[in-house]
Structure formats: structure tokens, C-alpha cells
Amino acid sequence: MEKSARTMKYNFKEIESRWQKYWEDNKIFQAPEYPSRDTFYMLVMFAYPSGDIHMGHFRNYIIGDAVARYQMMKGKDVLHPFGWDAFGLPAERAAIQRGLHPAEWTYKNIEVSRSTLKKTGISFDWSREVISCDPEYYKWTQWMFVQLFKKGLACQKEGLVNWCPEDKTVLANEQVVDGKCERCHTQVEKKLQTQWYFKITEYADRLIDDLDKLPGWPENVKAMQKEWIGRSYGAEIDFIIKETGERLPIYTTRPDTIYGVTFMALAPESPIIGRLNLEGKYKADVEAYRQKAVKRSEIDRAAATGEKDGVFTGKYAVNPFNGELVQLWVADYVLAHYGTGAVMAVPGHDSRDFQFAKKYKIPIKIVIHPDAKAQLNLAEMTDAYTDYGIMVNSAHFDGQVGQDAIKAVTEYAVKNNYGRFKKNFKLRDWLISRQRYWGAPIPIIHCPDCGAVAVPEVNLPILLPPVENYLPKGRSPLADVPEFINVKCPKCGMAAQRDPDTMDTFVCSSWYYLRYIDPNNDSEPFSREKATEWMPINRYVGGITHATGHLIYFRFFQKFLFDIGWVKDPEPASILFNHGMVMDSQGEVMSKSRGNVVSPITLMDERGVDISRLGMFFTAPSEKEVLWSDDVITGVEKFVINRFYPMVESYRDSNPDLKQYFKLNDMPENEKAAYIKLNQTIKKVTEDSERLQFNTMISALMELMRDYSPSDNKNDALNDYIILKSIQLIAPMAPHMAEEMWAACKQHGSIFRSSWPQADESALVFDTITIAVQINGKLRGQIEIKKDASETQVMDVVKKSDRIAGYLGEGRIVKTIYIPGKLLNIVIK
């Protein structure tokens, strides 16, 4: 490519167009089929094509892009793919609203979003693009289902499901937010239905235990997953329903409180209620309560705060430890899927039970004291005592303490055949079938004689048939397509029917990262050899909203594929990074419904891609929320146009050796200071690149530019060395500008084929300190300055800082408070 002529004019449209064409023509970002160097798999989360991208997407993708480009310069073979999570309910609903077919709506959105992404110049390897609604992709989603089915991990069973009356389909627990459908915000109902599930519960222990093998994952995400999976250890005790003699197993983590049980609480959905033979007023009251309770969200019901209510059944259970009768109540704070859907209530030692007992005047017993000397007085208690302690009023267990007491009580129950040690989980099996059209058809045929039979792999994919009417009916629209439904059984050849449901889109997005590795393979989902070369994902970037949905599901899929020998690693991603959300200037999350979405297209057209990128990077640390306004662009735009880009005018064509260091002791003081500052900047920017702290990387480069003056440097080689290294340091964040400057300085090839700068350890002389700068008591930034700098010198540097000086505006400085070596506070009016 011809080298650009030097010019101080930053014509971003011409520069960006030229370099994007160069990257495409030269396949700069195309990953090799079989890598020959160290690899780096940089992955951003699967994109849903609901419309054009907004600033939240823009932030996500430029973070991943900067990482990918940095790793390229570190000499890695980089895989940085992109694709579309194209099936699912949102596309179907949007298509219905517009009178379109979901395919038409989806592919049109993909085309628009792809075009926008290509304008951003992000280093995606577009040759590996996958679209989950393409048959070439969902063939292998169906293959995954078949493998799970063969191993007994995909099954059909009856259970209570979350039902969205607006979308007329079931939802997984993760798709219900505050009791409402996460997509349409309709109140979710509970229905008893037969559905397909993946037995993710069989992986519950591994999903928790292996989190400890992921030091590169945020602790808050790991904590959220552990809480969602909800493993606990305790005992299951068999109470007996007095009237029927039925055993009522109760799971508890505190069997040491067994003698304090005064009532039992059943979940409103519990099938046990139907076997109690309720009559008269009790039957009517319980039924009315159940109808009301199931409309509340599980989050509200299970919350520790808020008033608890319930209704008495008029029935009793027998405590096997002491033979006492305890009241049977129905209470909505008990969830049907936790334990056995019933709890033993110990109001003296559980806060919710305490509130409930006080409200309904149920007896309260004290069976745990803090210790032998500290005695509880029920008359003085305003809440339950929930800590461990010494057992009292508990027959021959009196005096037992803490974990020893729990073990002793459980062992006694085991010995007497009415209890057992028990491990429990909150996690439920993953409900994956949907009564909608726009999804991958479930590859199962139902035969009257053979039962559920998997479609033979050679017959995949089962294509989604074209239909005229795909409107939701409460059952799958595919059930009304005879030529699709009616088939012969693969086993016996008799008349049979296909399963009419489609799969939840989360299934498609649980393995997509593996298809990127081998997207054109038509004989298997991906090459195991290629997966061995590229996996695991080195860095996975996306929002934290998927912590207890997608991020659990794709870990489950990886473990299953590991078990059947398709991948070598039990975990899919070594490092996870969650970026902060992009908010509008008022602090509201950007969304189409609020009408506050900012498009990066407008910004890029007005200010350029790289300045838009730098503005997003500079405004906040990557993991923090961004309050977006166009004002955040101003500072970096001035920096680029006035300071950084014009550096090429000072390049002297000395063509310095970028792999060599300068001899510090042979330099004059001003050159030595410039060389030291450069190497300190290289060290700072490199460390911050590893931590994705782009805002401080930009600050470091601003300080370098502030302190360095080419006119003061008579050493041509050092001058050019500083300029070239500076261009390399900014390249991952401002790639088009860096390429243009690199070419203007007569460097050959793409800057992303050059080597990342290495700091000269002998030149890392830190004789500077960091001063925090406040304006009217509010922290506005930091500056680096010599240890012995005076307040006047500190103030002079602050006024020259593009970032901090902007906060001074037209204000009049009325006072400064300087704490030497630590803080400068400027008071303005």
C-alpha cells in the first residue's frame, strides 16, 4: 500500500476507509486454520440481531477488539470471530408486530448490524461468521440434543412451568425477572405441562466445584452462580401426615432444631395438598390462597424481607422425634422445587417462621441457646435466634453443640429409619422446549410402540418448515403442519409423529464458540483437533446479565462435551470480563422502549471511529458504568487532533531500530528524561492492557505527549523511536489512526504485524509521584510529577492536563489546598 503523505489534517473518513480496505484485502484478521504460533482466542458474547447496534454493543466490541489487536502485536495467532444468536422469541414477536416472517426480520437485522460493525473496523474474522438459524448451524444444535438424549440427559417429563400468557410459551427460570417475562414483561403464570429438559442438575456439583479452578473469573459472577445452583448439606426427615399416614420428607440444614418444630409449611403448588382430603372451609380457603399465591414471583415469595402469609389446612403431621402433632399450613414463601416442597417450621430459630408464627399465633419453642451461660428468653425476643449453639429442650440431645449436634441428630434419624443425610440444590433441570415457531426443531420422533426416538444423525438437520401461520396458539405452530409432523418411526417403521416443539435459543448459544473454530465443517460440529489448538477461550467479554443463564449453560455444554471426548478442557473460558453498562446522561439504561438509544453510527460519522473509541475508553474504567454524552469526546478529540496525530510532522526519517534500547548514561539530561518517561509509559500501558484499563492507558499517553517536545530533542533516532513506540502503544485503541501514522513514518506493513513495545528495565527510574487532584472537593484526576515539585509546579501541570483543566472551565480559583506528595484541592467559584 502506498504510504500516506504527512499532514496535520486528520481526515478520519479517508483514513478509516483506506485502512479498512487494506485490512480486508490483506486478510489481516483472518485466523489460520491451524495456528503455527501461540494462540489467543478472543471472544465477545453472541449477538442477538434485534436491530442495529447501540453504544452498549459498541463498548463491548471495541473492548474485545483492543484485546485482539494487542495480542496480535504480541505475536499471537488470534481468533476473534463473530456471529448471530438468530433464533428466539424476540425476533418472532417483532416479526409478528410488523407482519413479517421471522426469517425476513432476522436476516434484515443481521445485514444492518453487520454493515455497522464493519464501519467500526473491528478486527472480526468475518470468514468464520455463524448464524444460528442457518440449517448448517442448527443441524449441529440438533446433533447436540441427540447426544444428550443418548446419554439420558435430555428427557421429557411433567412439571410446573413458567408460562407467559402473552407469548403463549414456557420460560426457563432464568428468563423470569421479578415474576415477569424478561422479554414482554407480562406476569408469568404457573402451569403443569410435559416438557423437554436437560438434566443440568447432574452436573450441579461440578458446576460449583470447578468455579474454584477459574481464578480469571470475577468473584461476583462465581458467587452468583454458586447462589443460583444453591448447594447445601443437611438432613431429610420423614414426618408422617396424621390423617393419611403418608410420609412427608422434609429437607433441613438445621436438624439440630428438630424439637422446635411447631408447624409445617407446604408450597402452594405442592401435590401433597391434593392428597390431604381437605373439606369444607379449609378446602375453600386453601384453594383461594393457592390461586393467589402462584401469581407472585418466586423472588418475591422467597425474599427474606416482607410480610409472610399462609392458610391453615386443618391437618397435622407427626414429628418422628417426639411424636408431637404439628400444624400443616400452606405458605407461599415455600417453593415447590426446593427440597420436597415442604419445610419444617421452627419459629424460635428461623426469622420467616418467627414472623409467620407471631402473625398466626402458632406456638414458639426455644431449643437452642447461644451457649451454656447465655439463655434466651422468649418473652424478650423480637426475632428468631438463628445462629448455632447448644441444644436444649431436646430430650437426650441436650448439651450437643453446633455441627456435632447436627451430625448426632441426623445419625439418630438414620438409625431409626426416618431420616438420612442429604445434599440439596436450588438448581432445577433446564427446561428447553418452546411452543413457538422460530427455533431449532427438536429432533425427536414419538412412536406409539417405541416411545421417544432420536432422529438418526444422518437425517439431520430437521429443517424448520415454511409456514403461513406461525402465530402463538399455546402449542407449537409446527403441530399444524401435517407434512412435517407425520413421519415413520426410525426404529420400527410404523406411523409416528415428530415432536412439535422447538428449542430455546439458549441451546444455540451454549456451544457457538466451538463452531467458530471450524464453521464450514459439514461432517461434524467441529474438528476436535482444531478445538485442541484453540481452546480454551483466553478472554470472554460480555455483560454480567448472563451470569446465571448463558454462563451456566455454556459451562454445562462444555463439561458434557468433555465427558464424551469432544473437547480437552472441562471449562470453556479461562478469563471472563464483564464490562459496565452504557447509560444515558441521566443515568438510565439505554433501551429502545425508553427512546434513549444512542447510535454509534451518528457519532462515528461526525467524529470518526477512532475518536469515538477513545472517548468510550477514556470516560470510565471498562468494568464501570458509563454515563454517555457527546461531551466525553471533546477531550480526546483535542488530544488526537492537536497533540498526537501531528507527531508525524516531527518524524525525521532516522528509521531507528525498534528492537534496541538506548544507553541511558550516554544521554543528555533532557533526552534521558524523555527516554525514561517513554519506558515508564510502555510499562504502564502494557500492564493496563492486560487489565483492560484503557482509560489509564490513554491518560499515560496524554502525559507522555504533554512532557515530550520534539524541538527539545536533537537526537533524531531517539525522537523517531519515541514517536513510533507511541503510535504502537495507541494502536489497539485507535487502529485506523495508528496505521496511518505508521505508514506516514515510512514503516512497512500493518502496524498490527509489528511487535508490541518492550520497556527498557534500566530506564524505569521512578523519581515521580502521583498527586490526586480535587476540584471543590471532588476527585477529578491524577497527575505524575517529580517528587520534589513545588505547589506552583503541581498547579502548572494541572492546568496543562487536558482532562483535569476542563473541569476548571471559566471558574475563578479562590483557594488551593496542597498536601505535599499526596493531594491538591482547588476551590473555584
Image (tube, rainbow, N blue to C red):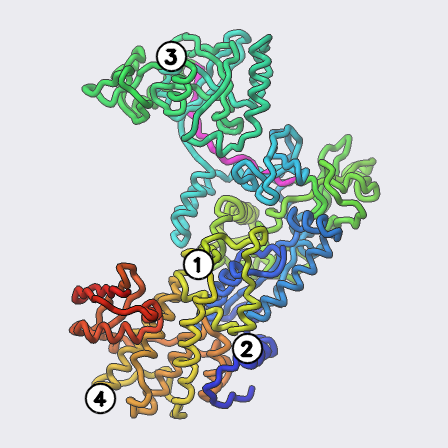
Q: Nearer the viewer, residue 722 or 134?
A: 722
Question: What residue is shown at x 38% (from left), y 83% (from top)?
Answer: 723
Q: Which mark is residue 363?
A: 3
Estimate the x, y position of residue 638 in percent, counting from the top left.
41, 76
* In this view, the mark in front (3 or 4): 3
Question: What residue is shown at x 41% (from left), y 64% (from top)?
Answer: 619
Circle 2: residue type: Glu
Circle 4: residue type: Pro
Which numbered disc flags the more N-terminal residue, 3 or 4?
3
Question: What residue is shown at x 21% (from left), y 85% (from top)?
Answer: 669
Mark 4 — residue? 668
Classify mark 3: residues with Cα within 10 Å, few (<14), some (14-19) or many (20+): some
Instruction: Identify the image quadrant of residue 86.
Output: bottom right
Q: Nearer the viewer, residue 144 or 82?
A: 82
Instruction: Identify the image quadrant of residue 491.
Output: top right
- Point out the stretch of residues depicted in magenta: 417-433
Q: Is residue 464 magenta?
A: no
Q: CA distance from mark 3 to mark 2?
A: 76 Å
Classify mark 4: residues with Cα within 10 Å, few (<14), some (14-19) or many (20+): few
Q: CA distance from mark 1 to mark 4?
A: 44 Å
Q: Is residue 682 visible?
A: no
Mark 2 — residue? 16
Discs 1, 4 touching: Cβ within 8 Å: no
Circle 1: residue type: Val
